[in-house]
Amino acid sequence: MTDAAPPTAPARLPALAVWRFQIGDRLAWRVAAAIALSIVSAALLVALSGHNPLAAFAAMAAGAAGSPHQLGVALNRATPYLLAGGGVAVCFRAGVINIGAEGQIALGGVGAAAVSLRWPDTPSPAAAIVALLGAAALGAAWAGVATAIHLGRRVHEVLATLLLNFVALLLVQQTLAGPLGQTGAGFLQSPQIPAAAWLGKAPDLGAHAGVVVAVVAAVALSLILWLTPFGFALRVAGRSRRAAAYAGFSMNGLTWSVMLLAGALAGLAGGVEVLGMHHRLIEGFSTGFGFKAVTVALLGALEPLAVIPAALFVGLLEAGSLSMQRQIGVPSALVAVIEGMTMLFVLAATVRRA
Amino acid sequence: MTALLQMRGIVRCFGAVRANDDVDLDVSGGEILGLLGENGSGKSTLMKVLFGMIPADAGDIVFRGRRLDGHRPIDAMVAGVAMIHQHFMLIEAMTVVENVMLGWAETGRLLKRSEMAARVHEASRRFGLDLEPEAVVADLPLGRRQRIEILKAVLREAELLILDEPTSNLAPSEVADLLTILRRLREQGKGVVFITHKLPEVLDVCDRVVVLRAGRVSGRAPIGAVTKAQLAEMMVGRDVTAPHATRQAPSKLDRLIVTDVEGPGLGPLSFSVKGGEVLGVAGVDGNGQLELAETLAGLRRPHGGALSVDGLDLIEASVAARTEAGLAYMPADRSSTALVKGLSIAENLMLRDSRRAPYSRGLLLSRAARDAKARALMREYDIRAPYPTTLAGRLSGGNQQKIGVARELDRKPAALIAHQAAWGLDPGATRFVVERVLALRAAGAAIVYLSSELDEVLDVADRVAVIANGRFAGVVARRDVDLGQIGIWMSGQAA
């Protein structure tokens, strides 16, 4: 070791490393290989179903980013994934396996709808903000229930968060059948919420303001993770709970913080969906967003900034596959298979080994 | 004697570091070769290359006349090389014979249990291993478990046994037994590579010795021709005489007071340590050392008792509050408590101080301050690594421990609990740790130094306590130490 000189004049790291992504070697190559593999296997499946793969891919590309409007569709789809995925990423970083985003999203939708229907006369920008706060509060509260069960009764957090998802979905049904429901709709949904609470949309693009909220949230999460003592504590806890205890961090406090944070973000995702897309609360408006958020968080290697492209990728993929289904007539089940396979390939290429 | 193994010109680099740089190594059948070197000198790398765990960048390996190239551990095993790791690869809930059968083709698809038991019995007698085939591993002391590994190797007809730091976990009598077994292996014509940094053992049992330093061979000699001092010189390239502190007397003031502390496997225990005093706690591992250290540090809740540092009552205080109050702690477990291997050196240096200046400025962490502090500490504590952002897990054991030392001592603590602070370190790093602890003593801190290495305790302590079954079997001033008495206390018998 005598030849390893002490670091008298250490070279500076490139400025790009300020927020230090922790992404492995030759990532670009592995991602390229994963995408190539998924294209080949998707082509095979499309051909087997009796359609022309080239036409299918053309439709998919056009559907994903063929026009500003299509791009807007993809951005809107990516938004809930980004919001909820960022929260999931922070939980996983802290070693808290929260898979309750689905239920927290559902409750967030209830929160947004309830606030804007209860106070219909709130003026324009405030209405949306207050409704989003309501969504975040209810999402966080639902995450809080899981945390209380987990910490108070020592139920594993996977069980506590997962099982409460089903309870949350039933709760949404119950509120729609009761206080929030629209009578005579023949379908479980709330009345339309006042237009003052709708999220503004960009002209042409059609992307709603939730996109901005989500990107700001992801940047803020990355800041928290890398530049605050709290972020440091949760990174330590995620790698070694014993080291966290030795460092004097309270695991209970950390668990509460990350769960409430993730719950609020998932709640926001639900709120954004209600205020930006449907303009009412509809039963089952979240079609597995919370579970895809886990995929997106892992795709983004649990780095909030990297979750942005990951969410966008899934959004583009979904918008594209929908249009492929519409235009070429590829069955929807096959579309789901292609989507799932592509995510698996990319995950296999990007997720770092423990 | 026939040449069993020839390694020629082995080179292996990790980034810019040449962990092995043109190393030659020969072992003959019926020979015990001592492979000496400090931590990070390249011993483990060389053996991993031999065993096929990592490929060499250059060089040739010839084993029993056949070239090993691009081989994997399984190939090395089939060829007749056996590696006995520091941490045993045994399943504790199973018996000796079950562990021997595990993953061995000759066991057959249907387990030939009694036949195997007979073979275990026979080999155990031939090599003096004294193992019962049906004993459950969990019931056996560490020394016996190690023999199971040796037994597995000889039953699989290994011709070359590599033992990586085999004595570091053993009690003195077990070490003596192990050395006898190694001689037995030599008589039976086996080759043995004995990796260690304990010079007396090398001189006792080896035929030849090869010394590595910074990845190169810094010396080789037959045992009869070298002295302990020469070997130490080859190993560290500098003088490593034991620390001899010019000791001033401790102050009159008790800084750390422990009263009737009691918990599972611990106490009740009372003692006090004065400023500028080291209380050495000796004892066989597993007699309450961990419980004592963690209870004082706040990681375990005691059933009762009191703890004060400089008059401040801390028994109910959180870990963070204890740290703030000047109580420093160096845990024995460095791999996942004292150090987070996946974080950088700089982040590990701020592990327990992240919410304080200079690391925190208001709500945010200051990266510049953190890295500047890390550079200063790396210089002051001689932590050898290219950058503060280098991952701590990439450092050698000695450098990892220096991170812990730097972090805990830089706070200028009033009291320090050090548990196995020099465990597994080479003589240079051990001396470094001991000197820093003694410097802290000179600065007036109260120190509790727990170690299962009696020599180390005797080196640093002003008073020596022996812990057995969670209590102090006896406490004696360093100058009045009677080794016989210490031994009796250690074995748990009342004085």
Image (tube, rainbow, N blue to C red):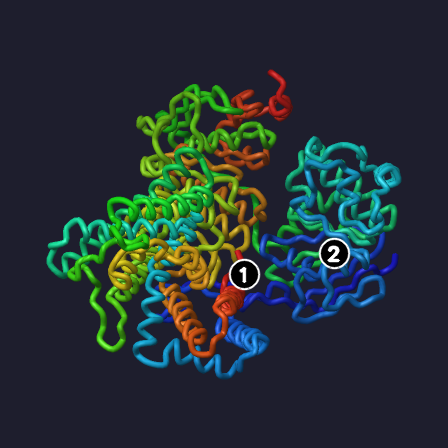
Give me the C-alpha separation between circle 1 and circle 2. Answer: 22 Å
Q: Give whichever of A55, B255 is nearer the camera.
A: A55
Quarter of the image with the N terminus of chain B in it = bottom right
Identify the residue at image location x=45%, y=82%: A58
**Location of residue B363 in the rendering, given as x and y in whole percent from the top left corner:** 25, 52
Q: Give whichever of A232, A185 is nearer the camera.
A: A185
Question: In the figure, is residue B90 to the left or right of B445?
Answer: right
| Front: mark 1 or 2 | 1
Q: Residues within 10 Å of mark 1 (few under 14, many from 20)?
A: few
Q: Amino acid at mark 2?
A: Ala
Identify the residue at image location x=57%, y=65%: B14
Quarter of the image with the C terminus of chain B in it = top right
Q: Residues within 10 Å of mark 2 (few under 14, many from 20)?
A: some
Pinpoint the chain carrying mark 1.
Answer: A
Secondary structure at numbered mark 2: strand
Identify the residue at image location x=80%, y=61%: B5
Which residue lies under the disc numbered 2? B221
Pinpoint the chain carrying mark 2.
Answer: B
Which quadrant of the structure image shows residue B11?
bottom right
Which residue lies under the disc numbered 1? A2
Which quadrant of the structure image shows residue B324?
top left
Secondary structure at numbered mark 1: loop
Decide: is B387 above or below B458: below
Q: Amino acid at mark 1?
A: Thr
